[in-house]
Amino acid sequence: MAKNLLIVESPAKAKTIEKILGDDFEVKSCYGHIRDLKKEEMGIDIKNNYQPTYIIPEDKEKVVKELKQLSKKSSQVWLATDEDREGEAISWHLCEVLGLDPATTKRIIFHEITKPAIRAAVENPRTVDMNLVNAQQARRILDRVVGFELSPVLWRKMSMKNNLSAGRVQSVAVRLIAEREREINAFKPASSYRIEALFTAKDISGKPVGFTAEGKKQSSAESAEKFLQSCIGGVYTVADIQVKPGKKSPPAPFTTSTLQQEASRKLGYSVSRTMVLAQKLYESGRITYMRTDSLNLSETAMESITAQINAQYGKKYLQPRKFKNKNESAQEAHEAIRPTDMQTASIEDSDSKRLYELIWKRTIASQMSDAELERTTARISISTNKEELTAQGEVLKFDGFLKVYMEDRDEEDLMEDERQEGMLPPLTVNQELPLKEMKATERFSRPLPRYTEASLVKKLEELGIGRPSTYAPTISTIQKRGYVEKRDKEGVKRDFQILRLKNGKLTSETAQENTGAEKSKLFPTDLGLVVTDFLKQHFNDVMDYHFTARIEQEFDEVAAGKLKWNKMIDDFYNPFKKDVENTIENAERIKGERELGIDEASGKKVIARMGRYGPMVQIGDVSDEEKPRFAKLKNTQSIETISFEEAMELFKLPRQLGGFEDKEVTVNIGRFGPYIAHDKNFYSLGKELDPYSITLEEAIPIIVEKRKAKAERTIKIFEKEKIQVLRGPYGPYIKQGLRNYKIPKEQQETAAELDLEEVKKIIEEAKANPPKKSFRKKKA
DNA sequence: CAGTGAGCGAGCTTCCGCTTGACTT
């Protein structure tokens, strides 16, 4: 029997620590929080100074039971949960549940899982810091109050489905996306003309090479033309050359947020995919903990990184550094994300290979030398006017960390920086340069791009909203609730002008570019837009981008013992509750109504608004004698941007296409998208076919094909019993009514020969042994 | 599977932050 029981949060950690501590210690994990507020009455007794009631969630009962037993058998319990607010609270909950005295139970912390760190921790135990615990309780209670008071307001004021939600984090995340969308919609591109002159000069070997020099941006076609005119017959001379050294420093090692960003930019992973793969790497002992905001590398890690750089790249490439977290909300309970073994630069054929290599490179690069550059700027004078041109070149003198790793940049940061910096041939002052051609190209200003999952995480982190463990879940929540959609957007063609000066002659041409195309970006839905407007109007405080930062300061005061947690909650709750009551009492239902125009045929108003089943357009009013006409918006359309013409187009469905086999063929858009209806059967339209323009000739093959496919899928039908034996993607199966039943493996080969008795037997057996319940509750 | 569109109100939903599961219908 072990004398000592040491409890950590993560089972993977427990395994490692047990090895380090040896036989005297039994190391167990509690798998994160073991208690939570009960859901009834919010789990908070508001009248009694916000007294919380905690329960042990069902899925934690097993681990709590085990810890209780082990705790009873041990003479000493060590609480080694993470060193942050949440970790401290977990330790306190453990005390409560295991019947330990928080004033005397040994509480230890370590930031890295190494022998010296853990030994040192065990030698310097403290006790649970109740101020920090109270800060966590305040955080928990505030989040519960905000979530459980706001969500029901939405249920009452929105005539839509019943699982809407609002919260301190998710609602602000949606707001970011909503506001970005509106900025983009309101954006008016301004055009200007970029001046580029193409010269040639000899390189070191005497070979002529081309290079580009830029002139001052011109604000209109007229001024651009005037400028080119003034250059006709000009002589171009190098007026001045400046050479400046420059350097680039490597980025810090990965945190959760930067890992998600880089995996998105470099590998195209969603944040949840990144986290799933990182979790695998962590569990197999390949990397350190993946939910972290810390930039620290342990002493031992630094040693092995240093050794690796020296061995692989040489001393010249080594430049050890400590990175400081700029983020105030960082709690730094763990290390940065790094490989556990720096000698392993790559791992074998697993799907997490690419992510691992990314982590390895980033970790190595963070301790490598700066890259050294030389930036050359040449000013070129024009004999025929006062303006000058500048040519810039950049030469890498020493690659440093760039040998291993180059951080990608977000679109957002690339915007104004279109200049491509290449090499310049050697130039001398007073050297005359022959002009090949000069171009004035029309360029348009662009709005900020829509958020990707990862750039949203970056923004949230900057605002201090959310934690490493919640970025991925938050992004999936706002999509699940239907506030936000991830999708592509096709660009639109746009003409732009190019003026060209060549051989002393000025010409002009029109070219075309694609603009506004987006891939895998976050778009707000109409639901997201109207809910955001509603919440902003009535709960401006909570929706403020700096709300979290402000209350974090107060949590810090609670943690420092300067502020009582229930006083803090009380100060927040009273005005908040008034807003809630006032909103329930007085606010109108959320409609998001927008008038589009007048329908000529009926003379009635055409409006777009939120309906019971989503965004729609409507001709006429419910108070009219005649019932209004309704049509659902397409999922790429929005109440805010739909035009009158687009709205009228929607009323053209359902369409009668004509007759086929003596039955009418109609086309419409239904619950599951566009479809053709014929003889009480329905046929989905593929993406290529547009219900507004499809013809009878195009519709008939769809009907015929579908019938054929259905026949091919069918192995056997027992008409009377309404049982079918069908061919599915996982092999043959049995269908009775709406339910499917698996055919046992040994009978799959001969599925065609099954008789009614056998089929019934399979169904009976399947019913008697239902598949095991999945862990997660399934809800539509 | 392919409807609906207002409001009443059974009984339900909902938050954020810790941590891993066992699911192939």
Image (cartoon, coloured by chain):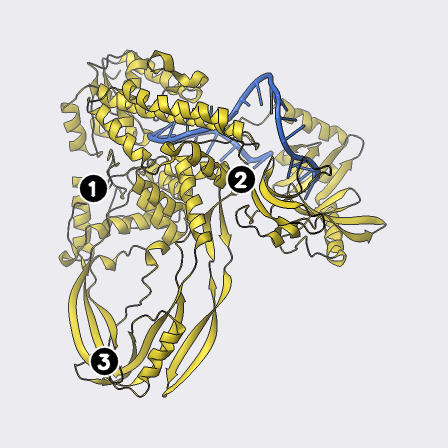
Chain colours: A yellow, B blue
In the rendered view, tell whether residue A90 sits above or below residue A239.
above
Among the two numbered marks 2 and 1 on one chain, the one whose residue lies closer to the N terminus:
1
Same chain assignment for discs 3 and 1: yes
Label 2 SS: loop
As drawn, the residue found furthest toward the front would be A603
Q: Which residue is mark 2?
A: A592
Q: Nearer the viewer, mark 2 or mark 1?
A: 2
**Horizontal and vertical percent position of residue A763:** 68, 28
Label 3 or label 1, whichever lies nearer to me, is 3
From the viewer's side, name the closer residue of A146 and A462.
Answer: A146
Image quadrant where residue A463 sits: top left
Amino acid carrying mark 3 in the image: Ser
User: Left or right: A779 with respect to A260?
Assistant: right
User: Badge 1 is on which residue?
Assistant: A297
Disc 3 and disc 2 on one polypeptide chain: yes
Q: Which mark is residue A381?
A: 3
